[in-house]
Amino acid sequence: EEVAVYFSAEEWDLLDPWQKALYREVMLENYGMAVSVGCQGSTPALISWLKEEGLFLQSSTEDLQTEGDPQRKSSEMEMEDIAVALFLWHMILVTSGEILRLCMALRMIDQQLMLRVCEMFECRRRRPRRHLLVGQPYTCHRSLLEAWLPMAEVGNQTVWVFPRSADWWEQFVLLACSDELWMQSFRMTRATFYEIVEKLAPRLQRTITRMRQPIPVDKRLAMTLWYLKGKNTYTNIQEQFGVGLSTIAEAVIEVCLAMELDLLSETVCLGPAFSTIMDGFASLGFPHCIGAVGRSHIRIRKPKGREAEYKNGKYFCSLLLQGTVDHTGRFIDAEISWSGKTHDASVFQSSNIFKAMDAGVFVPGNPTVTMGGVQVPPLIIADSAYPIRRWLMRPYGRGGNARQRHFDRKLNRARNIVEGTFGRLKSRWGCLQHRLDVAEDNVFCIVLACIILHNICEVKGHPIPSEEFAQDPLPHRPQPEFTVAGDEREEREGEQVRDAVADFLWQRRRI
């Protein structure tokens, strides 16, 4: 009777045939276990009915009482049975039969283990984290667990997780690590590290429970940086920090998502000081420019059944990271939602920065200058794979005259900053140099987290370890020119602006 679950006629009619079969199987198995441990008595009416596969309704409860139990239960036991029945009813409807059978068996053996299964069940239902805010559980499952806690009568648990040593983090890194070693290990100073911890703490801080102490926010951020800085597997991080593999996997994605939610808009943006960016590009030889656009491949594992969609010209699966950077190598925009086989210009034309520049709202006030009688808006420079527009400059290419070749040299010199930026990004956060062995949905937040951290380090002036610096290991193969039908007017206006800028640079070549 302690593990029996009764259904009314309406509830029984709602069950699918497989759920009814599962109910019969579990109840007969529980009765067999009870008999095996010595709980022998007259066969309950429920079990007899299940064996005969007849109709059983809870409305006939009086007929189902065993001969040796004249007074069925006290009010306390009825409340406990209601809690158990509600929990198991929920499990029948939304979980697999294996978990249900396990919970039913554990309920007969140990209530502490039953509570642990409840906790595991709640965590299991929180897997699609990208579609939720970080750290927000399903309310119905949380309330279910909280309702079960006071009825489970769980004693003090001595060990909730497998014991591992965390001495490297707690005794060495926090207490004795030098500033130089800290910089080498986490790619930033201790002060910058704890500034990020302070910003992420409201979202990542967990509540202390009776089960275990939560992992501190600084440790979770450190594990994430350790993963991002190189080709570190979860096993490497486990050895350093003394944390389970599944916990590490969850922590890395949660921290990256938190950075995307809380830090992206304030770090990857043009900023109010756009005139400083224009002055910086002018010092590189190109006037009235606010950014240089480029792209690089991010290697990913093969999506099952969709390899052809992601296989690029270099014959491996990748996503295309397209970024626009300022004169210092700081990202002001990034796009990471396209497969590696997509043409660069197609990605750029679908990006938010393209639409904002076309509308004249990306740069505050959209200031223009006059060159040779032509109004020149804020410019972005690109290579020959991109279409030309009033605000998007690309080289003339081969076969030009001296004035055009001079323009191309100036543009390419200023645009080299974007190639160096991708090299520094992947040198500082080495996980981008190798294949990201994570789910496709999690690639986006990991790459964006690397870009956010790159911008923070660039603004703070943190150097890259000399042994780590290298050019982009996955440079992008040049693509043919991209033309769009119906853009003749935009192309004519872009050529007028390019000619005006070329004349301006040619006239100032000896100044």
Image (cartoon, helix red, strand yellow):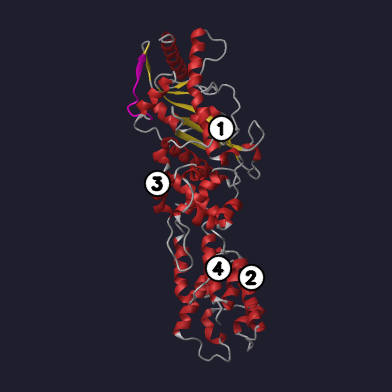
Q: Is residue 356 left or right of residue 238?
A: left
Residue 14 visible: no
Residue 376 coordinates in the image, percent (x, y): 38, 18
Residue span colored magenta:
362-370
Residue 238 coordinates in the image, percent (x, y): 58, 55
Name the residue that disc number 3 marks: 195
- Identify the disc placed on residue 296: 1
The residue sitting at the left extreme is: 365
Q: What is the three-letter code of the residue carrying label 1?
A: Ser
Q: What is the three-letter code of the residue carrying label 4?
A: Val
Return the disc, 4 or 1, that comes first in the chain's sequence: 4
Distance of label 2 from label 1 (alpha carbons) = 54 Å
Distance of label 4 from label 2 (alpha carbons) = 23 Å
Quick one: quadrant of the C terminus? Answer: top left
For mark 4, does the 10 Å Cα neighbourhood hold few (<14), some (14 to 19), or many (20 or more) residues? some
Name the residue that disc number 2 marks: 21
Distance of label 2 from label 3 (alpha carbons) = 57 Å
Q: Is residue 273 left or right of residue 126?
A: left
The answer to whether 248 is drawn above or below residue 492 in the figure is: below
